[in-house]
């Protein structure tokens, strides 16, 4: 079965291409252009990002507690070391 050139090009290139006046392959070009759609990826990232943004106060409070605990631990160690030095 022999197909006309326009039909052959349509099958070879697919429906996303437009064919100009000439039926040669050089005249075929993308109809709408190729644009990547990253809305799905953005939707995936939006959830965790929003969660981090909402929890920023809790994270700041946790950071403050950890720093305070570390400072108090250092001070207690220094007092224990000083007391040990006084005994010996």
Image (spheres, grey):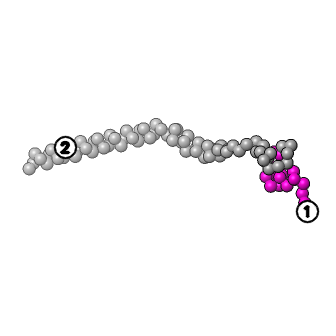
Q: Is mark 1 on a helix, strand or loop?
A: loop
Q: Is residue 60 left or right of residue 49?
A: left
Whether 87 is among the magenta residues is no
The residue stretch that appears in magenta: 1-19
Q: Where is residue 17 in the image (x, y as percent from the top left)?
A: 79, 47
Disc 2 to disc 1, C-alpha distance: 96 Å
Q: Is residue 46 left or right of residue 73?
A: right
According to the image, label 2 marks what residue?
79
Q: Is mark 2 on a helix, strand or loop?
A: helix
Q: In this view, does 83 lie to the left or right of 11?
A: left
Question: 88 or 34: which is nearer to us?
Answer: 34
Taking the spot 19% from the left edge, 43% from the top edge, the residue there is 79
Q: Position of residue 45 (x, y in %)?
A: 58, 45
According to the image, label 1 marks what residue?
1
10 Å crowding of disc 1: few (<14), some (14-19), many (20+): few
Taking the spot 55% from the left edge, 44% from the top edge, the residue there is 48
Q: Position of residue 37 (x, y in %)?
A: 67, 44
10 Å crowding of disc 2: few (<14), some (14-19), many (20+): few
- Outermost residue on the bottom side: it is 1
Q: In this view, does 60 lie above or below 16?
A: above
Q: In this view, does 50 lie to the left or right of 69?
A: right
Q: Name the quarter where the N terminus is drawn.
A: bottom right
Whether 10 is among the magenta residues is yes
């Amino acid at each position: 079965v022999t197909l006309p050139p326009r039909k052959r090009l349509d099958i070879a290139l697919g429906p996303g291409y437009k064919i100009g006046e000439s039926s040669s392959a050089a005249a075929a070009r993308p109809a709408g252009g190729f644009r990547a759609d990253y809305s799905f990826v953005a939707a995936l990232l939006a959830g965790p990002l929003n969660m981090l943004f909402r929890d920023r106060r809790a994270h700041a409070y946790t950071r403050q507690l950890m720093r305070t605990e570390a400072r108090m631990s250092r001070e207690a160690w220094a007092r224990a070391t000083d007391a040990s030095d006084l005994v010996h």
